Amino acid sequence: MKIHNFSAGPAILPRTVLEQASAALLDFNGTGLSLIEVSHRDKDFEGVMHEARAAVKRLLGLGDDFEVLYLQGGASLQFAMVPMNLLRPDGKAAYVNTGTWATKAIEDAQKLGEVQVIASSEDKNFSYLPTGYTIPKDVDYLHITSNNTIYGTQMQSFPDSPVPVVCDMSSDIFSRPVPASSMGLIYAGAQKNMGPAGTTLVVIRKDLVGHSGRRLNAMLDYGVHIKGQSMYNTPPVFAVYVSMLTLQWIEAQGGLTAMEKHNRAKAGLLYAEIERNTLFRPTVTDGTGSLMNVTFVLHDSKHEVVFEGLLREAGISGLKGHRSVGGYRASLYNAMPIESVQVLVDVMQALENQYAS
């Protein structure tokens, strides 16, 4: 039976990428060694790191004024590294709070300096995105989260900011074109649209590096990692390699414009069924529903047992919603085929038909 993996992450990856990565585990570039056995200082792996960084710039349309890093510690470590590197000891930072991960980023930044939460949707359990907020001109940076994995909201546009924008794009990186060159820093855990868990992408404008006035430990200093070309310490070679393959796969599909078209078709199919089906309702209703994480619930919980039985019979996995929202969450990352979304829609219709008959 084919399994349709709607997991929020670690998430589905392209089949061809998995096949290439599997082959490299046994014989990397004809060396006779496994990818995870070669030295990260070996010229073959240095080529991988170079291409992995270059592919990011190609896809995001970035020039030499940006640096690309592959780090470790997940996006959660960036909650601390961002203020460590960008927030001056006597400075201030502005944050928009749109979910659990933004909340955690705020909490870490508050340990290092003054934080102004200039907008929040916490009052309605993060079921919408705040608008109409004013960005202070006297802060060191503005921090936003482009997509909220748990709550199913996604920014439809990005703020025109008088200060550098820092964006957590962990769950929608490379899913659509974004104005990356107008931002100061982008970070994202790899395990959604890039690769396996284990590496974290950081894209930073060069002129923002080294001006926080803080003495930082080497592993927490962007400047150290830039100088070391993401190899100050041993990098997660497998995660970087699979990320490189995935970025090349995205390019082969037509780049970010093609990804957005594909993702809009998948999300549109599912949102239309949620709106039409008498047994379900969406949890996001302000027009900011995510293309990556579609959240919905049953009107009546008495249908849960039957619905979840139908899901298992259809081979649908990873659909359970986060405990903060409940219900169901369909994660439609780049590698998710529209055929799998149709299987989910068919199951939803089968449930409706069962109770209508």
Image (cartoon, helix red, strand yellow):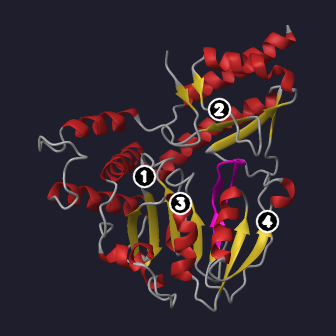
Q: Which residue is tagged 1?
A: 198
- Camera sees residue 48: yes
Identify the residue at horizontal 86%, vertical 21% (top origin).
302
The circle drawn on residue 319 is: 2
Q: Are marks 1 and 2 in contact (CB under 8 Å)?
A: no
Q: How many residues crowd around disc 2 within 10 Å: few (fewer than 14), some, or many (20 or more)?
A: many
Depth check: give the residue in front, 91 or 159: 91
- Comes first in the chain, label 1 or label 2: 1
Mark 4 → mark 3, Cα distance in angstroms: 20 Å
Coordinates of residue 334 in the picture (x, y in percent): 50, 42
Q: Is residue 231 left or right of residue 133?
A: left
Any part of residue 158 in sight: no
Q: Is residue 131 above or below residue 258?
A: below
Nearer to us: label 1 or label 4: 1
Type of the residue with mark 4: Ser
**Segment tinted magenta in the rendering:** 143-157
**Is residue 124 left or right of 56 when viewed as pictured?**
right
Q: Residue at x 76, y 36 (%)?
A: 296
Report x, y in % for residue 43. Answer: 15, 59
Sequence order check: which comes first, mark 1 or mark 3? 3
71 vs 147: above or below: below
Circle 3 residue: 75
Name the residue carrying label 4: 120
Amino acid carrying mark 2 in the image:
Leu
The circle drawn on residue 69 is none
| Circle nearer the N terminus (2, 4) | 4
Question: Within the magenta stretch, is there residue 154?
Answer: yes
- Asked if labels 2 and 3 touch by Cβ distance under 8 angstroms, the answer is no
SS state under label 1: loop
Of mark 4 and mark 3, the one earlier in the sequence is 3
Q: Amino acid at mark 1?
A: Gly
